[in-house]
Structures are given as structure tokens and as C-alpha cells.
Image: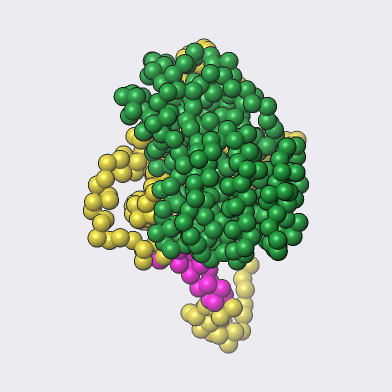
Amino acid sequence: MRRRVDSLTLVAATALLAAGCATSTSTSTGTGTGTGSVSDGARDGAVAGVTGPLTVLAAASLTDAFTRIGADFEAANPGVSVTFSFAGSSQLAQQITAGAPADVFAAASPATMATVVSAGEAAGEPAVFARNQLVIAVPDGNPAGVTGLADLTRSGVKVALCAEQVPCGAAARTALDAAGSDLVPVTFERDVRAALSKVRLGEVDAAVVYRTDAAVAADEVDAVEFAESAQAINDYPIVTLAAAANPPAGEAFVGYVRSAAGQAVLTAAGFQSP
Amino acid sequence: MTVTAPPAVSRRRRRTDRRPPVFLALPALAGLAFLTLPLAGLLLRTPWGQLPARLTAPGVLDALRLSLLTATAATVLCLLLGVPLAWLLARTRFPGRSLIRALVTVPLVLPPVVGGVALLLVYGRRGLVGGWLDSAFGVTLPFTTTAVVLAEAFVAMPFLIIAVEGALRGADPRYEEAAATLGASRWTTFRRVTLPMVGPGIAAGSVLCWARALGEFGATITFAGNFPGRTQTMPLAVYLALEQDLDAAIVLSLLLLTVSVVILAGLRDRWVGGLR
């Protein structure tokens, strides 16, 4: 199936570059353009008495959705200013266990969340707020004619996978094993956006990435769904941190992400509701 | 010219020479601590008991071998291209020379990941040069060991050029002129006069270049990708280990550090010292 999602090319390009290297920090102020859910958010997102700065560490794959949710949340709670730091989940987990000051952590896999919980850094039970499924991203027009996992093992088809140490790579391994595929990629990329950028630059014919990442690059990349991805659906947990400087705002943000308004933004970005 | 100084002054100077002045010693020690404390942090956190098992884990020696091989190849490439470029910058006058000198330092300023993307845009399958290589010869560079060497050379070459250019500017051009008046050809002058004069500069530049190439991460993973045994150098292995297992990452880093320090110290005794 081909998906062409109309999205902000500039945001996509920036996110791609930013996701490449280290932690990218952005404040959501002024970036919430054109979301349909601002008014909904204002209705069910406002929590009386929530003010002050709020720091959210979130997985790189949440960059676009959370930037919108942050703007909506600020609109609903005028006293709050949300700052995001987007990076690979495991990098963020290491920052948290090393004492980085933050209020909320949203991870791209239960495994990375577990390292934070077992370090005693979580203020409660993490809640799954979104799920993500793998697709095969191919360059616009699908020049190699990829229709499923089986095509990726054809000779001459160059494939990028995420490294198995990061969530998208672990999920891809699960899906490939479920399919009994003996795929050998040309590269194990360090994160999902790096794998996607190899497709955008035309250096590989396909990459196994999350549906949401393919959606962000929809102007240059087509997404091919494959049945085995159902075996490797990724849960995204979120939690308020024990060391939070602003626990009420953290709780309110977690509640907002899980509310109908937050879920609408996530679904529009290609996530599934849990 | 002879300098005559009162004996009292020279005695005092000799005495103070033995002890570095406080205003230099304190910041020097602070600088040393600043540079070495992170290493101490790594050593304190190292799981010594697991060391043998970690070092013999599959892929570790492959990554080390690949790192040493590519860093050395990149240094050779930098020497072949960088020394002539440094000579051009130091010994000739042409319009736009200061602009060229600034352009040479671009890889120093450019975030290596962006450098990797830039390399893809030129040498990639759809790149300016890469597209031609692919259609004319069926050669694609990304995801090959050659790409690792290119990425490392791109990032490391400015270190060599700057060191060698500095040495050339410090060397007296009159020796070269004298060689020329005695009938030496330009190639002979360069080989027998210029190169020996700036030998220590070239050696220092090569060491910097090799060390930078050995530690290269961003441009390599972006341009060459990450595949064990082919493009996964030690820094890439360390980065990915860090995603899951801090201990493994520390052990790999220490291995890389130890090997590079041993090699550099050995080289220093053998031929950096010999050139003095």
C-alpha cells in the first residue's frame, strides 16, 4: 500500500538532520501550526493550577507529534512552557539515570523504559500511550518494485536496517524472524531516521522503518506495508520522573498525551492508539 | 650576535628554570586534570572481571582491525594529497589563497554527520561524482571500506594540512633557493631539502591526522553505514554498544585508547624522536 501523507517538509528535513547526531532540543512555542485539535485540547487538556516550565524527554520518533501536542498543551494551560529534548530512547534513558533534570520521559520501547524504572527514576507505573508498526520505506515511485519482505532478499536490492541495539532494529529482527527471512542488509543504521535518510538520498532501495517515520518523509518516500510487521508492534510508554521539578505539570502532560486530543495528534502522525 | 647578560641575572634564571613558575604550573596541572579525569572516570567504571570475555566477544577484533587499517589508509591518503596542498598554501602566491585556506578548514567546523551527508551527495549512488562512477564503472562507494577511508580522510586532512603548512612557513625558504641555485631540480629540492626540513611537522600532522581518523564517528556512520567487518569501526561499535550496555562500550573504548596510545608512543620513540 502506498501512503502519501501531506506534511511539513521543512519540519521533516530538520528533524532528519537533528535526529542524525545528538540530542536535539526544541521548544514547542510557536511551532503548533495548523493542528485541528487545539480547541479540543483547550477543552479537555486544561488542568487548574498547572504552571511553570516543563521538560519532556521523548524518543526521536515522537519529534513531530509531540511538538504539536506540546503547543496544544501550552495553549490549554497558558502558564506552562514545555521544552522537549528529542533523542534516541536509550540515550535519553542514560541521561535520566545519570541525573539529567527532566519531568517526563516518553520512550520508544518498553525495554528502555524498564532501565529507567529499575533505576528508581520513575514516579509511577509507565503507561503505554501509542503503538508503532514497521513498514518498508522505498524511494518515491518504488524503483526496485518492492511489495513485501520477500523482495528485500532479491539480489541487487540494497536494504538498510536499524541496528539491533535500537528499538526499530530489534523490531525488524523480530519481524524478519517471523517471516523466516535471511535478509542481509548493507548497513545497520544507528537510528530509524538515519535508516530513512539513506532511502531519501537514494543510497538504498529499501529500509525497514516505523510507519510514522515514513509518513514524515512522505514527499520523498513511499511506505510498503507487510503482514509480518504485526509480529513486531512497538509499544511507547510514558511516565513522570521521580526527580521531576514540576510534578503537577508532568502529570498533566501525561494525562494530555493519553487524552482524546493527544491521541488524535498521534493517530494523525501514523501511530496506533494502545 | 652575542648576548651578554650580567652573571647574577643568568644565575637566577638558571635557578628558576628548574622550577616552573606558579602562574604556568597551576593552569598546566588544571589542564592536565581536565583532560585526564574523564579517562579516570572510565577506568573507575571498567568491569575488569569481565574484561577477557568482553574483549573476545565476536566482532570486537574485527572492528579494531578495521579501525587501524582504515585510519592508516586515510593518513596515507591525507599525506599524498595534503602535503602538496600545504606546500601550495605556504610557498606560492595566488589570488584567493586566504579563501582556499579557509575552505581547507571547513571539515573542522562542519559537524561530521553533516560532512557525511555532504559526502553522500557527492560520492553517493545519486551523487555528482558517485552517479558517474556507478553508471560508467558500476562502482558504488557508500557502505564499503573505501567509504570509511574517504570519510576519515575528509575529516582528518585539515589537521595534517594545518600542521604541515605551519612547519613550512616556519622553515627558511632560502635553503630551497640555495638548492635551486646549486642546480637541484624542483622535485629534488622538494624531496631532499623541503621535506626533511618540515619532517617533524609532517610527523606531528600525521599523528594528529591518524588519531582523528581513528576516532572518527559521524561522517563514517553517515557515509559508509555500519556493517560488521566491512564498515563498523571501533567508534561505531562503541556507539551501538552504548545503546544497550554501558560496560561493553567502556571496554571497547579502553581497548581503542590503549592500542592507539601504545602505537603513538612507539612511533614517537622510533621516528618522531629520530627526526629531531
Query: In the image, is residue B29 part of the stretch drawn in magenta?
Result: yes
Q: Main secondary structure of the magenta part?
A: helix
Residue at position x 23%, y 53% from top? Answer: B52
Q: Nearer the viewer, residue B23 or A258?
A: A258
Tell me, yes or no, if residue B20 can be seen here.
yes
Tell me, yes or no, if residue B77 can be seen here.
no
Horizontal relation, residue A33 to residue B253: left or right: right
Type of colouring: by chain
Above or below, comparing residue B60 to residue A103 in the picture: above
Q: Nearer the viewer, residue A3 or B272?
A: A3
Picture coordinates of residue B150 (x, y %)?
49, 33
Query: In the image, is residue B157 part of the stretch drawn in magenta?
Result: no
Please state the extent of the stretch shown in magenta in the rendering.
B24-40
Tell me the yellow chain: B
Tell me the green chain: A
Residue at position x 45%, y 45% from top? Answer: A109
